[in-house]
Image: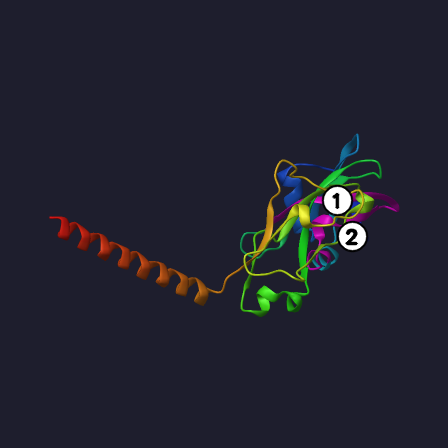
Amino acid sequence: MSASATITAEIRERAGKGAARATRRAGRVPAVVYGNKKDPEMVSLNPIELHKLLHKPGFFSTVFDLDLSGKKQRVLARDLQLHPVTDFPLHVDFMRVSADMKVSVMIPVHFINEEDSPGIKRGGVLNIVRHEIEIESSPDNIPAEITIDLTGLEIGDGIHISNVSLPDGVEPTITDRDFTIATVAAPSSVKSEASEEGEEEGGEEGGEEAAGEEGEE
């Protein structure tokens, strides 16, 4: 399960772009908290505290305890606006969550035991198709990452979502196809040799056909 963390907030009295700019001039980051059948709340965050959380893995998959004047509510970050030049956070959207609801979250994929893959040991390359997988889960069951074991994989083998053991209560959002997460591809030198062999075979066949045509004429 993904680790939880606490983030403190203060009430903002006004909404709108002008109020948000005023909040930033005051040295804080504007944010909004919505969802769970309650009215939206305009809040502001400490930029230093937010900066630390942003540089930890899993910002969008962590259930935060948002501390608003001593009253805590569980939230997930759903949107983050950054300054196009400085990457300074400009605005954050938080969604309230409860234990009985399902949420869709992008979870990073972590690969282990590359040294136990015969294909990779022979020079194969791990081709990662999806670095993250979107899952659906209750807030309490959100995994920090999805671990995929590469043991025994040969060149040409692929890992599909059906090959992955997800935690109880966690399901992939995409259910209509068995999508690929990664493959063990042949090294470029092997591909190049196979391509050259194919070209040589094609040239030989073409020469024999030409000779036959000339003989018939």
> Residue 58 in the image: x percent, y percent?
71, 54
Q: Nearer the viewer, residue 96 or 158?
A: 158
Residue pictured at 60% horizontal, 44% vertical: 179
Q: Nearer the viewer, residue 97 or 166?
A: 166
Task: Label 1, secondary structure: give it.
Answer: strand
- Mark closer to the observer (1, 2): 2
As drawn, 141 above or below 88: above
Residue on which the image places disc 1: 76
Residue pictured at 67% horizontal, 39% vertical: 173
Q: Nearer the viewer, residue 6 or 164?
A: 164
Q: Main secondary structure of the magenta part?
A: strand
> Residue 104 in the image: x percent, y percent?
70, 40
Q: Nearer the viewer, residue 27 or 139?
A: 139
Q: Which residues are magenta?
A: 53-82
Residue pictured at 41% horizontal, 62% vertical: 194
Residue on which the image places disc 2: 2
Alpha carbon of mark 1 to alpha carbon of mark 2: how far?
12 Å
> Residue 63 in the image: x percent, y percent?
78, 48
* Left or right side of 186 for 27: right
- Identify the colour scheme used: rainbow
Residue pictured at 63% horizontal, 45% vertical: 21
Amino acid type indicated by mark 2: Ser
Q: Quadrant of residue 13?
A: top right
Classify 10 Å Cα crowding around label 2: few (below 14), some (14-19), many (20 and above).
Answer: some
Classify 10 Å Cα crowding around label 1: few (below 14), some (14-19), many (20 and above).
Answer: many
Task: Label 2, secondary structure: give it.
Answer: loop
Magenta region includes residue 3: no
Q: Which residue appears farthest toward the right when viewing the image?
A: 70
Examine the rendering and report whether any part of residue 109 can be seen: yes
Residue 116 numbered mark, or none: none
How many marks are shown on the rendered structure? 2
